[in-house]
Image (cartoon, rainbow, N blue to C red):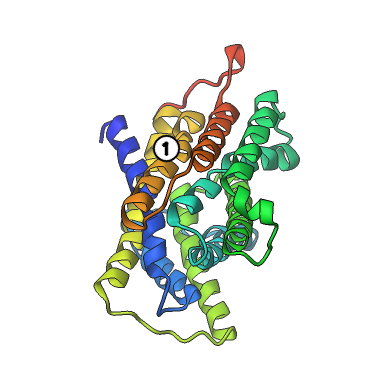
Amino acid sequence: MPGPLLYAVTVLIWGTTWYGIALQVGTVPETVSVAYRFAIAGALLLAFCLARGRRLAFGWRDQLLIAAQGACLFCINYVVFYVAAGYLPSGLLAVVFSTIVVMNMIGAALFFGTPMRRQVVAGAGIGLTGMGLLFWPELHGFDLSSDGMIGLGLSLFATAFVSAGNLISARNQRAGLGVMETNALGMSYGAGFTTVFALLNGDAFLFDTSFAYIGSLLYLAVPGSVIAFWCYLTLLGRIGAERASYAMVLFPVIALGVSTLVEGFRWSPMTFAGVALILAGNVLVMTRTGARAEAPARG
C-alpha cells in the first residue's frame, strides 16, 4: 500500500474512532465494552501471529512488562476514556488526547535520558495555553463538578496511562520484542484485566443489540484496533517515528469535524483559538531543526 494511502487510512480511522467510543456509552457498562473490544482485537492479532509463525512465548519478566503494557494501553486508559465520553464531545476527547505528544517526550526525558529540547518546553507552554482557552468557561467558574472539568481531568488521566504504555512499549522494543506480538498479547491481557475489574466492580455483562452499538464495537475492534494499527506501524517503518507522529495532529481535526456534524459541537472564537494553539504546540514539539533532525527509517 502506498505511503500516502497508509497515512490517510490511519488518520481517517483514528479520527473517527472517538465518535465510535461515544456510541458505546449507554446500556453496556464501560468496562464491559472495553473488554468486548479488546477480546475481539486480541483474538484477531493472536490468530494473525500464529498463522505467520511469529513468536508468542516469552520469559516471565518480559511477560510481566507486556502485561503492564496491556494494562496501560488496552485497559485502564480506555475504561477512563469511555467514562469521559459521557462528559465531553468526542472531538474534544481527541484534542485532549493529542497532548500525548508532549507527555511522551517528557517521559522519554525522565526515564530514558532523552535530551529535552527547547521546542518541547515552548510547545508544551503553547499547548497548555490552548487548553486553558478551550476549557475557559470551566476554569473561569472553577467548578470541579462541572461536566467539562470532569471530562478534562478524566481525559488527561487516561492520556497519561497511554503515555506510560508507550514508554513500556519502547522498553519492550529495545529488548527485541516484536511490536505486533507484544500488542497481540497486550490486547489479550487488557481484555482479561478489564473483565476481572468488571466482575469485581459488579458490572453486568450486558450486550446492546442495536445497530449503533454492534457497528461501533466492530469498527473499534477491527479498523480501530487492528487495521489502523497495522497501517501506522507500516508507516512508522517507512518514514520514521517523528514524521509518522504528525497523525496525532491531524486526527483531532477529523474528530472535531465529525463531532460538529453529528454531535452538534459548537465552535466559538475561544474554542477555535484553543484548538489551534494545542495543535500548533504539538507541531512545534515534533519539529526538529538543522543537523539535529533524524533521518527517517527505511522499511
Quadrant housing the C terminus: top left
Q: Residues within 10 Å of mark 1 (few under 14, many from 20)?
A: some
Quarter of the figure with residue 125: top right
Say whether residue 42 is visible.
no
Say whether residue 80 is visible.
yes
Write the residue at 44% across / 33% down.
244
Residue 53 image point, x, y percent: 36, 54
Quarter of the figure with residue 149: bottom right
> Where is 288 relative to 82, above or below?
above
Q: Is residue 175 left or right of residue 55?
A: right
Residue 174 image point, x, y percent: 60, 41
Residue 216 image point, x, y percent: 32, 64
Q: Nearer the viewer, residue 89 or 176?
A: 89
Kindly identify the amino acid type of the residue bearing the numbered disc 1.
Answer: Leu
Quadrant housing the N terminus: top left
Residue at the extreme top? 290
Would you name the residue on which mark 1 appears?
250
> Where is 186 relative to 297, above or below?
below
Quarter of the figure with residue 250: top left
Write the residue at 31% across / 60% down.
219
Q: Nearer the viewer, residue 274 or 296?
A: 274
Residue 118 image point, x, y percent: 70, 24
Which SS class for mark 1? helix
